[in-house]
Structure formats: C-alpha cells, structure tokens
Image (cartoon, rainbow, N blue to C red):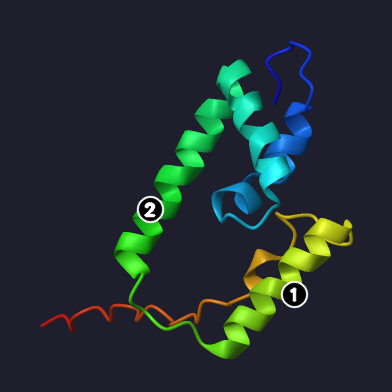
C-alpha cells in the first residue's frame, strides 16, 4: 500500500513495523518517524487506525484470558519465520493452533411403517 507520494519513511517500512509501533516496541526516534509519516499519508493512517481498533477489540474481548505458554511460543516462532522470510503469512496458518474437527453426526432416516 502506498499513497504514491514520496515520504522520508517509505510506506512499506511503516506497514512492515506497524505492530511494533502499536505495541510501543520501537525506539522513540522511529516512533517519531512513523508519527510524521501518518500525518503525511492518509492510507497508512487509515491502516494504523484499523489495526489499532482491532487490537483494542481483541484486548477487550480476550484480555483477561491466559495464553498457554506453548501456544505463545508457537506464535512467536511463526512471527520470527515470517519476518525472516522463511514462511509466507498465509501459508499453513493451521499449524500454529489447529482447530479440532468434530465429525458432524449424520441423520438416520426414520423407519418407514
């Protein structure tokens, strides 16, 4: 995504590190660069606002739930693989936390009289 305008900080860099910005996990100097970019670039600002809203919603709905340690480790491992370029984000998402499949019972026709 890009607005097509030149910026000191490229849109792709901002979007690649958006969650670090949202989670306040980056140096203040980088935060300042991102804030300046958001003032100049409405598509990135819109994406930031959307991701911020999703993060708040998840926190409100799931904030009090404890995350199992093994799940956290698996998710963090996947994030590291994606960041390193060894895994495409849409690739094999079920391997992080597979959803158990429960077979749907089939209806048995009633006996005819």
Residue at point 79%, 27% (across, down): 10
In the picture as drawn, the residue positioned furthest to the bottom comes out as 69
Q: Are marks 2 and 1 in contact (CB under 8 Å)?
A: no
Q: Which residue is mark 1?
A: 77
Question: 113 or 7: nearer the eye?
Answer: 7
Residue at point 82%, 66% (across, down): 81
Left or right placement of residue 66 versus residue 96 in this view: left
State the image quarter where residue 53 is shown. Answer: top left
Residue at point 57%, 21% (across, down): 39
Q: Residues within 10 Å of mark 2 (few under 14, many from 20)?
A: few
Image position, residue 22 (x, y; %)? 55, 49
Left or right placement of residue 87 versus residue 47 in this view: right
Image position, residue 75 (x, y; %)? 65, 73
Image position, residue 33 (x, y; %)? 70, 33
Specify which label sits upstream in the sequence, 2 or 1. Answer: 2
In the picture as drawn, the residue positioned furthest to the front comes out as 29
State the image quarter where residue 86 is shown. Answer: bottom right
Left or right placement of residue 64 versus residue 76 in this view: left
* Quadrant including the N terminus: top right
Residue 95 appears anywhere in the view: no
In the picture as drawn, the residue positioned furthest to the left comes out as 113
Q: Residues within 10 Å of mark 1 (few under 14, many from 20)?
A: few
Up-down relation of residue 97 to residue 3 (above or below): below
* Quadrant including the C terminus: bottom left
Q: Which residue is mark 2?
A: 56
Residue 40 appears anywhere in the view: yes
């Amino acid at each position: 995504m890009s607005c097509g305008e030149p910026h000191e900080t490229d849109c792709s860099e901002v979007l690649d590190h958006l969650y670090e910005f949202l989670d306040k996990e980056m140096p203040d100097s980088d935060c300042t660069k991102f804030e300046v970019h958001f003032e100049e670039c409405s598509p990135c600002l819109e994406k930031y606002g959307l991701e911020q809203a999703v993060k708040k919603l998840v926190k409100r709905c799931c904030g009090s739930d404890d995350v199992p340690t093994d799940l956290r480790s698996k998710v963090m491992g996947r994030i590291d693989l994606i960041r390193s370029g060894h895994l495409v984000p849409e690739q094999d998402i079920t391997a992080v936390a597979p959803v158990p499949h429960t077979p749907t019972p089939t209806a048995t026709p009633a006996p005819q009289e």
